[in-house]
């Protein structure tokens, strides 16, 4: 039985590029269904995508995360290929991404961007991506090759068990952390990253979206590893309490008096907060384990890819 392959293209004001993206992926994957989700565009994105042969649906709520959530809920396939509609990803590598996913029975294959043109990948974006890759490696123990890549092949089992809570460009981070949390089989494939065609503008803003992604990563770290998160806070509070209260304690032991009462009260409060934070970490760690078991059961309830090769 042939695999059902769906190419998912989230778009917003990509009239310049969407026709080329649809045509390129129809050529690369002739049997695939191509879905373009128009995220409230004010140009001819939807009409051009439809005339190029794509199935077009519209999502008015702004934000890539919301579009991905709807795509994953509505489209049913065996293999999903998600790619941005800006024509910066190499469609000719799509068969290799799918083959790597299917032949190795993986759940996610990420296209790791390679480029030799500064116009393709702005230095600020490249630096931020490397920094986020390192941070994910420190927080979760595995460093991805390209955390923010918008070009991925996904199994049905991964897509239908993915909670998709993010709203905007944090969705790629959420996918990566979900894969790491469940320890699903995954792979990476280097691909060319192409310059944007003339007239096409990036929706990503380096500082604004970078801070949003960083904030979302901290939130994911808190939710996925609450004991480590709150233990770090407890350690900081305890250290501050020891620094402030150490002198007061030494002076009390020598004179049996507490001349700096406000400092003693502050140090005591910090140590109490440290203890509470540590206790919260222990309690929430049990909750997180329960959530992880539920996610794992939802993931295992779906059948994996069965290659017809």
Image: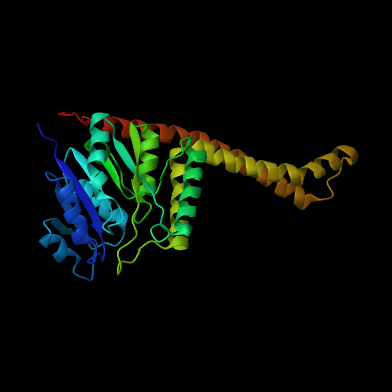
Q: Is residue 296 above or below residue 37?
A: above
Q: Which part of the image, by quadrant, shows the N terminus? A: top left
Q: Which residue is drawn at 31% across and 56% down?
A: 88
Report the front residue among 97 and 105: 97
Asked if 306 appears above or below 44 in the picture, the reply is above
- How many marks overall? 0
Is residue 280 visible to the viewer in this orientation of the structure?
no
Give the farthest residue toward the front. Answer: 116
Q: Residue at x 84, y 40 (%)?
A: 250
How far across and how far down the image is residue 221, in percent?
47, 43
Q: Which of 62 and 242 is in front in this view?
A: 62
Residue found at x 21% / y 50%: 8
Residue positioned most to the right: 255
Q: Residue 207, image x and y in percent?
A: 47, 62
Residue 64 located left or right of residue 24? right
Question: Relative to residue 154, is residue 20 depicted above or below?
Answer: below
Is 17 located above or below residue 228 in the figure?
below
Given residues 213 and 222, the one toward you in this image is: 213
| x then y, percent, for residue 177 | 40, 41
Q: How is the image coloured?
A: rainbow
Horizontal side, residue 18 vs residue 181: left or right: left
Quadrant that contains the C terminus? top left
| Residue 120 visible in rendering | yes
Residue 3 shown left or right of residue 289 in the figure: left
Residue 140: percent from left, percent from top: 47, 37
| Residue displayed at 43% across by 51% down | 216
């Amino acid at each position: 039985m042939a695999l059902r392959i769906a190419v998912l293209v989230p778009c917003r004001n990509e009239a310049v590029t969407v026709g080329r993206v649809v045509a390129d992926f129809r050529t690369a994957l002739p049997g695939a269904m191509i879905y373009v989700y128009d995220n409230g565009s004010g140009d001819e994105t939807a009409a051009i995508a439809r005339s190029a042969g794509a199935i077009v649906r519209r999502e008015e709520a702004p934000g890539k995360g919301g579009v991905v959530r709807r795509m994953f809920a509505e489209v049913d396939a065996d293999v999903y290929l998600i790619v941005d509609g800006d024509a910066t990803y190499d469609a000719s590598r799509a068969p290799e991404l799918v083959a790597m996913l299917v032949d190795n029975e993986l759940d996610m294959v990420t296209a790791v961007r390679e480029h030799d043109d500064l116009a393709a990948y702005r230095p600020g974006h490249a630096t931020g991506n490397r920094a986020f890759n390192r941070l994910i490696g420190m927080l979760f123990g595995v460093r991805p090759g390209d955390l923010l890549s918008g070009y991925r092949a996904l199994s049905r089992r991964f897509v239908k068990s993915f909670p998709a809570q993010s709203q905007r460009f944090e969705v790629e981070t959420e996918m990566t952390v979900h894969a790491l949390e469940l320890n699903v089989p995954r792979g990476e494939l280097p691909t060319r990253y192409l310059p944007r065609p003339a007239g096409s503008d990036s929706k990503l803003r380096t500082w604004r979206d970078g801070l949003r992604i960083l904030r979302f990563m901290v939130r994911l770290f808190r939710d996925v590893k609450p004991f480590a998160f709150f233990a770090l806070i407890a350690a900081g509070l305890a250290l501050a309490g020891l620094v402030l209260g150490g002198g007061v304690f030494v002076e009390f032991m020598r004179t049996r008096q507490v001349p700096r009462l406000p400092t003693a009260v502050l140090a005591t409060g910090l140590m109490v907060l440290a203890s509470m934070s540590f206790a919260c970490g222990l309690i929430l760690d049990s909750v997180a384990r329960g959530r992880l078991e539920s996610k794992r059961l939802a993931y295992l309830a779906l059948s994996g890819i069965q290659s017809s090769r």
